[in-house]
């Protein structure tokens, strides 16, 4: 019988000292043979320990999903400094705080250092060490058992955006399940579906460099950092470009903007519909563009007739004069003007309509494929990697647990509705789910109603998690397959325009961990699906991806990227819209087909009752979703989330800065410190997401702040599948 | 707010002043009082080396690199009060032990001949007041040089000097009164008490001037001083320093001088008043060290 | 002419992301609980909805008349001929006098070394021809460093072009961080 460990024994509390990884991670008392000799811990495998001197290794950051280029400085086998790669278009040589803090995650004492198999009740925090062979065999066995007994559909696969995601998708398709969950419906579904149904492309680019007028409604680039885009935003502000921010909260982006409009939550579409109203009434739209590239203009004219700025003022509480002025100025600047597509606007059920109104507003002004406007899909003009040749996938049997398309006919298949998937685990409808394989995703903290997600995990027969750290979801798993940190591994290659970039190990893995590529591959082997991921090791796979290009892997590793010479950007398809009509659909064919109003329209959002407040969530520049809170360097600059209260609200309940307050919604209750400010609407409470971890394996982050997912109600937009997070209302009281 | 210099430094400042004060008391009593003041001179000499040694010990413990301590004595940085102050204190402490030796009963004086020793006692007694004044005012210069609100008050060295003398006198009164052996005589005590009362009055004046000057200076300075008068340190300042440390002992001493205290109460009153002076002196260092750090420029 | 190293910080370009703070920690092994540089916020000023907020990055100002250097009892704190103020660890006894003397609170006592610690202007990077870590990573190009005496340096050019201010002028330390609050559309070329 092997020894059983608690989280406390698994992770030491030792302080991290760069260059001399806290030794004795498990403590000497915990057992023998668990670790490599102490002297090796800091330097990785023995061949590397021998490496003296300084070397620079080029790789790609994974502290968020933006994929910035990194140059790592390794001294005597220890990573000392990460710097931005000036050759990388995603960050132009700069790293954000999270990127800069990668080293702390690498050398964190809280890393999972070898495969773990649960040794007590689920969620008890009792584990035993397993070999990779055992852990993978066990996982494969369970997965096979589920498939044999209930069919492949009873097994769910989840992952978020990452470089090896395509290979995870191969694995799940080979396994044959229709059930795949991503983060998308919690994030940007309303933006992507809104634009997809208008332009036929989910996420057009934005030309900040020439833009003369920008409206942000849910893109907070100073705090939701997308490195290069954030830099572009700063440059734009420095150039004196008009930047209008609609946000109920005075974000840091708002502090940089020329105008902050504290819009009533959920009413942004009234603002945009009124802008459209003004632009049509004043005949300011680009008639030639509208005639040539769009369809449905007449219907729009009828629809927006009554959406006057005065009407909108009553809805969104932005003065009619301001709306009119902004409409005129925006039109004046067009086509070098952008109403930004935003990101996570999916905060109300009507956000889809907001996004449609934004998409249509840009179309009316012809802000498309022009300097300073929206940029057609960039994916089309990007190098294409070599693909693995594998047998045809089996046909997935059964309908999807996430309700796409049978419950949500309009949600694009690739996006899914993860919150419904979770709900259906609990209801057992339309069938019982039995197993869950989750790769680098943390549904416990990301999906609304945390308790429900935990209950869903408890209900399943089998849960396996692949992650670099003991996330809250891993905490409830049966098996944890520890992934190497990004500085220790390869991932799939990433082409950006005319360049191909590589993520590669900067140091050898410090512990007994593997890349997700190899975890997927070896799991496929154990499942008898090895032929679907036909590669020997990571290098073999990357070589296959590189086949179409005149460069070998070694060269790519040395330089860090490959640049295709005389590469021509393809703009021939800029005005070929992948919609059913082939035009920009002001009036959406699909919406019409579904019997819905085809042009952007006003849907009244719910409002909080007396003594209730809108609960808003958002980002901070110092953390990534729920992934980085355990990083102590980042905790130094952002130690915990607080509830933003307007001064008048704080006075009413008798709360001062940093006093504890209790927030309570229909589904949950949390206690969190107050941040009292004039920078928020008095009817709103804001908190940064991602705190309030329940995993005791995240020693630094455990117990810090509170989780918004404990408060969020599960409300889904039936059109886009987006989770309407801000339709959760809370009460607040002094703790 | 995190404090850079904490209690250790307060104790150091206090003990250095105390030792210097006790030393001067002894020196002057010896030089001008002769045999009549033999007892207080003796007690001052016995007392003087110890507080400062304790303070020095704490100071070294408070260093980030205590074993690097010797670096202080490899150089003399004239711009740094800590540098010349350390040298002064070094000499003061060494000599104060020498002075103590000279005051030991003959039975314990193993080296040197009585006559010579007596001569040295006189010489030292003439030198030590200068060193003592240097030590006592150095503690003010130390804070002066770190240009912070309150710390940069020009009168600070004088305040610390006066407070040092006052605590030194009070300590001598206390010890020579507590001791069963060589207990001070009434006359000695009377003069000391008189001196102490004078010093307390002087101290009150200086504090008053400092506050007036501070309040009429820059906004940062003025804010810092108001933290004493009405802010964070209001209790320490008014109750512990002004009330318990200055007014009450002054009152007691004046009563004593006027002979208004019934005989059986004299002894406890003397002890308490001198204790209160020490107590107040400590909190003067405390309040200035702390308030100077919790306030900064803006 | 002699070299006089210093910074220009453009507050209008700072978004308070704190990348500079993390980069400095990483580059200089700054222990948890302390920092060599910072970004201070004015807090949200004004009344809803007419509010504003300003961010002011900072670090040691490498002062012309550094009180931290003059009070140092062992000569460990020094001002180099190029203007950079450093601490020579070997001589530092950890008395923390310099910490109290710095009006900008730019120093801390490093619990791992027992020495006074502060911004070195990333001297070791300058020697290799690199920019200081905080400057290198700054997303807003808000932090700039260079030779204030060289008219062709970025910092001199910025100072020549825009109004600047220094902090706590009245204390007389002669700080060498020049702040620009105006919008700066282009960062000039220069070393
Ligand atoms: S900012 Fe402080 S530490 Fe830096 S040189 Fe000036 S006084 Fe010294
Ligand atoms: S110059 Fe270097 S040491 Fe100074 S604040 Fe910047 S990164 Fe830190
Ligand atoms: S890195 Fe630049 S933009 Fe970010 S906080 Fe620091 S100074 Fe400001």
Image (cartoon, grey):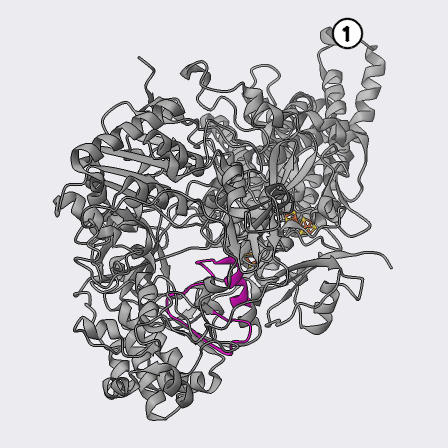
Residue A240 falls left or right of residue C7: left
Residue placed most toward the observer, B174 or A709: A709
x 54%, y 20%: residue: A38
Please state the chain letter of the residue tagged with numbered disc 1 in the rendered image. B
Residue at mark 1: B110
Residue A101 falls left or right of residue A516: right
Which x, y percent locates residue C98? 67, 43
Residue C61 falls left or right of residue A485: right
Which x, y percent locates residue B55? 62, 28
Residue A166 falls left or right of residue A153: right
Which x, y percent locates residue B35? 72, 22
Which x, y percent locates residue A56? 65, 42
Residue placed most toward the observer, A706 or B241: A706
Q: Quadrant of residue A150?
A: top left
The reply to whether residue B161 is in sight is: no
Q: Residue furthest bottom?
A: A282
Mark 1 element type: loop
Task: Give the vertical position of A48 relative to B237 (above or below).
Answer: above
Task: Give the vertical position of A363 relative to A228 (above or below).
Answer: below
Whereabouts is ligand 3, in terms of quadrant?
A: bottom right
Total marks in image: 1
What span is in magenta? A206-234
Task: Give the vertical position of A106 relative to A179 (above or below).
Answer: above
Q: Quadrant of residue C191?
A: bottom right
* Magenta stretch holds residue A214: yes
* Magenta stretch holds residue A456: no
Q: Residue furthest front?
A: A391
Q: Quadrant of residue A310?
A: bottom left
């Amino acid at each position: 019988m092997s020894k059983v460990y608690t989280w406390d024994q698994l992770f030491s509390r030792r302080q991290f000292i760069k260059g001399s990884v806290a030794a004795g991670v498990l403590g000497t008392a915990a057992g023998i043979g668990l670790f490599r000799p102490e002297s090796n811990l800091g330097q990785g495998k023995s061949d590397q320990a021998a490496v003296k001197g300084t070397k620079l290794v080029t790789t790609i950051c994974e502290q968020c999903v933006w994929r910035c280029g990194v140059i790592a400085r390794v001294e005597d086998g220890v990573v000392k400094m990460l710097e931005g790669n000036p050759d990388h278009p995603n960050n132009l040589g700069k790293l954000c705080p999270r990127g800069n803090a990668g080293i702390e995650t690498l050398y964190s004492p809280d890393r999972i250092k070898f495969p773990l198999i649960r040794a007590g009740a689920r969620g008890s925090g009792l584990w035993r060490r397993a070999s990779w062979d055992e852990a993978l065999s066990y996982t494969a066995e369970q997965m096979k058992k589920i498939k044999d007994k209930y069919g492949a559909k009873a097994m769910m696969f989840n992952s978020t955006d990452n470089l090896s995601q395509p290979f995870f998708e191969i694995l799940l398709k080979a396994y044959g399940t229709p059930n795949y969950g991503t983060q998308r419906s919690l994030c940007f579904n309303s933006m992507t579906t809104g634009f997809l149904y208008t332009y036929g492309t989910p996420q057009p680019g934005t030309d900040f460099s020439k833009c003369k007028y920008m409206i942000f409604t849910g893109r907070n680039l100073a705090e939701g950092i997308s490195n290069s885009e954030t830099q572009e935003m700063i440059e734009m502000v420095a150039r004196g470009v008009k930047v209008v921010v609609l946000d109920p909260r005075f974000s840091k982006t708002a502090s940089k903007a020329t105008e902050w409009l504290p819009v009533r939550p959920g009413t942004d579409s009234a603002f945009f519909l009124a802008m459209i109203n003004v632009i049509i009434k004043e005949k300011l739209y680009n008639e030639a563009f509208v005639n040539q590239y769009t369809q449905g203009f007449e219907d729009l004219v009828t629809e927006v007739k009554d959406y006057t700025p005065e009407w909108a003022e009553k809805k969104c509480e932005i003065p009619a004069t301001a709306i009119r002025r902004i409409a005129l100025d925006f039109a004046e600047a067009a086509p070098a003007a952008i109403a930004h597509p935003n990101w996570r606007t999916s905060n109300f059920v009507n956000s889809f309509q907001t996004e449609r109104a934004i998409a249509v507003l840009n179309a009316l002004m012809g802000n498309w494929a022009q300097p300073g406007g929206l940029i057609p899909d960039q994916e089309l003009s990007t190098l294409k990697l070599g693909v693995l040749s594998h047998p045809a996938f089996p046909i997935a049997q059964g309908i999807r647990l996430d309700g796409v398309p049978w419950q949500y006919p309009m949600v694009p298949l690739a996006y899914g509705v993860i919150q419904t998937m979770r709900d259906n685990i609990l209801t057992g409808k339309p069938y019982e789910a039995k197993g869950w394989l989750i790769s680098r995703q943390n549904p416990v903290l990301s999906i609304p109603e945390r308790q429900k997600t935990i209950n869903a995990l408890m209900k399943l027969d089998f849960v396996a998690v692949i992650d670099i750290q003991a996330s809250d979801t891993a905490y409830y798993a049966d098996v944890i397959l520890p992934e190497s940190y990004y500085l220790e591994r390869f991932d799939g290659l990433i082409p950006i325009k005319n360049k191909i970039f590589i993520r590669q190990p900067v140091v050898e893995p410090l512990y007994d961990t593997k890349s997700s590529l190899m975890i997927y591959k070896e799991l496929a082997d154990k499942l008898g699906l090895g032929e679907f991921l036909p590669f020997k090791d990571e290098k073999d796979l990357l070589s296959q991806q590189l086949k179409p290009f005149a460069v070998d892997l070694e060269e790519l590793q040395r330089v860090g990227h490959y640049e295709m010479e005389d590469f021509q950007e393809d703009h021939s398809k800029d005005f070929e819209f992948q919609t059913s009509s082939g035009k920009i659909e002001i009036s959406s064919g699909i919406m019409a087909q579904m019997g819905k109003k085809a042009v952007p329209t006003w849907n009244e959002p719910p409002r909080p009752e007396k003594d209730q407040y809108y609960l808003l969530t958002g980002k901070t520049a110092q953390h990534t979703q729920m992934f980085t809170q355990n990083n102590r360097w980042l905790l130094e600059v952002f130690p915990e989330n607080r509830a933003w209260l307007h001064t008048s609200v704080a006075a009413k309940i008798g709360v001062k800065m940093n006093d504890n307050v209790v927030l309570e919604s229909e589904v949950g209750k949390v206690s969190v410190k107050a941040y009292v400010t004039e920078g928020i609407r008095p009817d709103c409470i804001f908190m940064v997401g991602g705190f309030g971890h329940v995993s005791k394996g995240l020693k630094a982050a455990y117990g810090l702040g509170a989780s918004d997912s404990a408060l969020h109600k599960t409300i889904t937009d039936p059109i886009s599948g987006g989770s309407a997070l801000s339709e959760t209302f809370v009460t607040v009281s002094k703790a | 707010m995190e404090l850079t210099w904490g209690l250790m430094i307060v104790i150091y400042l206090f003990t250095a002043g105390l030792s210097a004060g006790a030393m001067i008391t002894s020196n002057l009593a010896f030089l001008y009082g002769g045999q009549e003041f033999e007892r207080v001179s003796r007690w001052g000499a016995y007392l003087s080396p110890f507080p400062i040694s304790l303070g020095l010990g704490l100071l070294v413990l408070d260093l980030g690199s205590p074993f690097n301590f010797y670096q202080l004595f490899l150089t003399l940085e004239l711009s740094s009060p800590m540098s010349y102050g350390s040298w002064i204190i070094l000499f003061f402490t060494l000599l104060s032990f020498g002075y103590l030796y000279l005051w030991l009963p003959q039975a314990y004086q193993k080296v040197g001949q009585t006559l010579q020793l007596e001569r040295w006692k006189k010489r030292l007694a003439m030198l030590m007041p200068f060193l003592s004044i240097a030590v006592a005012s150095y503690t003010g210069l130390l804070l002066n040089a770190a240009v912070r609100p309150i710390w940069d008050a020009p009168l600070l060295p004088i305040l610390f000097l006066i407070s040092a003398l006052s605590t030194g006198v009070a300590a001598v009164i206390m010890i020579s009164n507590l001791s069963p052996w060589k207990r001070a005589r009434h006359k000695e005590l009377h003069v000391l008490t008189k001196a102490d009362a004078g010093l307390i009055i002087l101290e009150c004046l200086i504090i008053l001037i400092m506050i007036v000057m501070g309040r009429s200076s820059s906004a940062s300075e003025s804010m810092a001083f108001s933290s004493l008068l009405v802010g964070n340190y209001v209790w320490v300042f008014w109750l512990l320093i002004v009330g318990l440390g200055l007014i009450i002992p002054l009152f007691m001493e004046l009563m004593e001088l006027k002979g208004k205290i019934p005989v059986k109460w004299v002894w406890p009153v003397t002890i308490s008043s001198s204790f209160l002076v020490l107590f107040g002196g400590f909190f003067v260092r405390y309040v200035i060290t702390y308030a100077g750090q919790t306030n900064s420029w803006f | 002419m002699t070299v006089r190293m210093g910074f220009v910080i453009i507050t209008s370009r700072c978004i308070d992301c704190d990348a500079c703070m993390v980069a400095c920690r990483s580059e200089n092994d700054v222990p948890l609980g302390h920092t060599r540089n910072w970004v201070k916020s004015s807090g949200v000023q004004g009344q809803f909805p007419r509010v504003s907020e300003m961010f002011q990055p900072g670090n040691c100002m490498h002062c012309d008349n550094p009180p931290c250097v003059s009070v140092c009892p062992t000569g460990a704190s020094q001002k180099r001929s190029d203007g950079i103020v450093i601490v020579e660890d070997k001589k530092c006894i950890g008395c923390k006098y310099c910490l109290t003397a710095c009006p900008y609170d730019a120093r801390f006592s490093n619990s791992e070394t027992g020495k006074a610690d502060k911004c070195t202007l990333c001297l070791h990077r300058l020697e290799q021809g690199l920019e200081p870590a905080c400057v290198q990573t700054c997303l807003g190009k808000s932090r700039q460093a260079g030779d204030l005496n060289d008219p062709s340096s970025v910092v001199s050019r910025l100072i020549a072009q825009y109004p600047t201010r220094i902090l706590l002028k009245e204390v007389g330390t002669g700080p060498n961080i020049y702040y620009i609050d105006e919008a700066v559309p282009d960062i000039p070329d220069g070393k």
